Every structure is written in structure tokens, then in C-alpha cells.
Image (tube, rainbow, N blue to C red):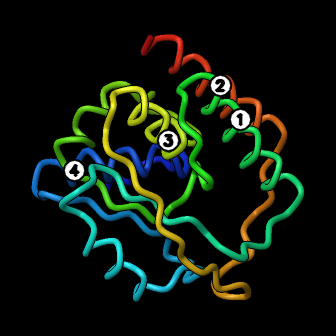
């Protein structure tokens, strides 16, 4: 039995997105930690025809200092470099039109640490129709999440910046 080496969360997401674009009209992403209830998908689905990218915005989210720093830092970087001001830039609760996702994927590094943030920035840069939808964050559900290391934070910021410059 051949096992695939774990390359991290970002690369796993990218592989899933690539596979999904081959078989689906829409791609929905959510984390499996139960922190955003599946019932909130219905509201996004109802809006899908008017948008290319629907982003859940985690309302009432509790974060560690490092997670708050990376979220705010990525939001600032994407605002400055891509011109998008998404409130929850790296949200793992999103619905994407496959044609739009297929345009974004070749522009995102395969080893991206925070591919969702990069894709949201690129979507704005390409003029895709983006809508944010509030979704309640269910504190205490699932895992609390491992704290992110400072090297990973720097890597996410650098990758996002490089991608923005390449996409100019």
C-alpha cells in the first residue's frame, strides 16, 4: 500500500479543489470540526445564482492571539494588494462556482499555506462577484485548533504578497 505524504492543510485543500472542478458545477468547502453548522449552507445555496464566490463570515469566533494576528494580517495584506476587504478572508465555509474556481486555481501556489485568503484576493482582482454571508461560529464545537507558528504566519504573508505581485 502506497501512502501519500502529508503536505499540510493548504496543499490538501488545493488537491480537493482541483478534483472537484472536474466533476461539479459548484464546490462547497467546510471544515470538519463542526464549528460552523451545516444548516447555514442553505442560505448560501439560495444566493448562488447571483455570485461566483460566497463566503461565510464567522460571527462570534473565539481565536488565539496568533490566529487573530494571521486573520487580521491576511485581511490587511489582501486589502492592500488585491483591493478586497473580506471580513473573514481565510474562512473555510465557502461556495464557489466551478468556472470561477477553475480560473483561480492556476494562480495559487500548490503549497499555499492559506489558499483561501489568496483565492479571495484573486477573485476580487479578477472582478468575480463575491458575497459575504454571516454564519454563527459555534464555540466549543470540534477542535480548538492548533496554534499557528510564527514561521507559518510569515509564510502565509509572503506567499500572499508574491501571488498578488505575479497576478498584477
Mark closer to the chain start, 3 or 1:
1
- Quadrant in the picture for residue 25: bottom left
**CA gap, disc 2 to disc 1?**
6 Å
Residue contact between numbered discs 2 and 1, judged by CB atoms under 8 Å: yes
Report crowding for label 4: few under 14, some 14 to 19, many 20 or more residues within 10 A (C-alpha).
few
Of circles 4 and 2, the one toward us is: 2
**CA gap, disc 4 to disc 2?**
31 Å
Residue 151, percent from left and from top: 79, 34
Of circles 3 and 4, the one toward us is: 3
Secondary structure beneath label 3:
helix
Of 5 and 112, which appears nearest the observer?
112
Q: Does 160 appear above or below 137?
A: above
**CA gap, disc 2 to disc 3?**
17 Å
Residue tagged by mark 1? Answer: 76
158 sits to left or right of 132 = right
Mark closer to the chain start, 2 or 3:
2
**CA gap, disc 3 to disc 1?**
16 Å
Residue tagged by mark 3? Answer: 115
Residue contact between numbered discs 3 and 4, judged by CB atoms under 8 Å: no
Residue 139, percent from left and from top: 72, 84
User: Which mark is on residue 19?
Assistant: 4
Which quadrant: the C terminus?
A: top left
Q: Does 65 appear above or below 150?
A: below
**CA gap, disc 3 to disc 4?**
15 Å
Residue tagged by mark 2? Answer: 80
Residue 94, percent from left and from top: 41, 61
Residue contact between numbered discs 2 and 3, judged by CB atoms under 8 Å: no
Which quadrant: the N terminus?
A: bottom left
103 sits to left or right of 161 = left
Mark closer to the chain start, 4 or 2:
4
Amino acid at each position: 500500500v502506497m501512502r501519500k505524504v502529508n503536505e499540510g492543510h493548504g496543499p490538501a485543500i488545493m488537491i480537493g479543489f482541483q478534483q472537484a472542478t472536474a466533476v461539479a458545477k459548484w464546490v462547497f468547502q467546510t471544515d470538519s470540526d463542526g464549528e460552523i453548522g451545516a444548516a447555514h449552507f442553505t442560505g448560501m445555496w439560495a444566493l448562488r445564482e447571483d455570485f461566483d464566490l460566497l463566503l461565510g463570515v464567522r460571527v462570534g469566533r473565539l481565536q488565539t492571539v496568533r490566529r487573530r494576528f494571521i486573520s487580521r494580517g491576511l485581511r490587511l495584506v489582501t486589502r492592500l494588494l488585491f483591493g478586497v476587504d473580506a471580513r473573514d478572508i481565510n474562512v473555510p465555509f465557502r461556495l464557489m462556482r466551478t468556472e470561477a474556481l477553475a480560473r483561480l486555481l492556476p494562480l495559487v501556489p500548490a503549497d499555499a499555506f492559506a489558499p483561501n485568503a489568496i483565492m479571495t484576493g484573486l477573485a476580487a482582482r479578477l472582478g468575480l462577484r463575491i458575497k459575504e454571508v454571516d454564519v454563527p461560529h459555534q464555540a466549543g464545537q470540534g477542535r480548538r485548533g492548533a496554534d499557528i507558528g510564527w514561521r507559518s504566519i510569515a509564510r502565509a504573508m509572503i506567499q500572499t504578497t508574491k501571488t498578488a505581485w505575479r497576478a498584477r
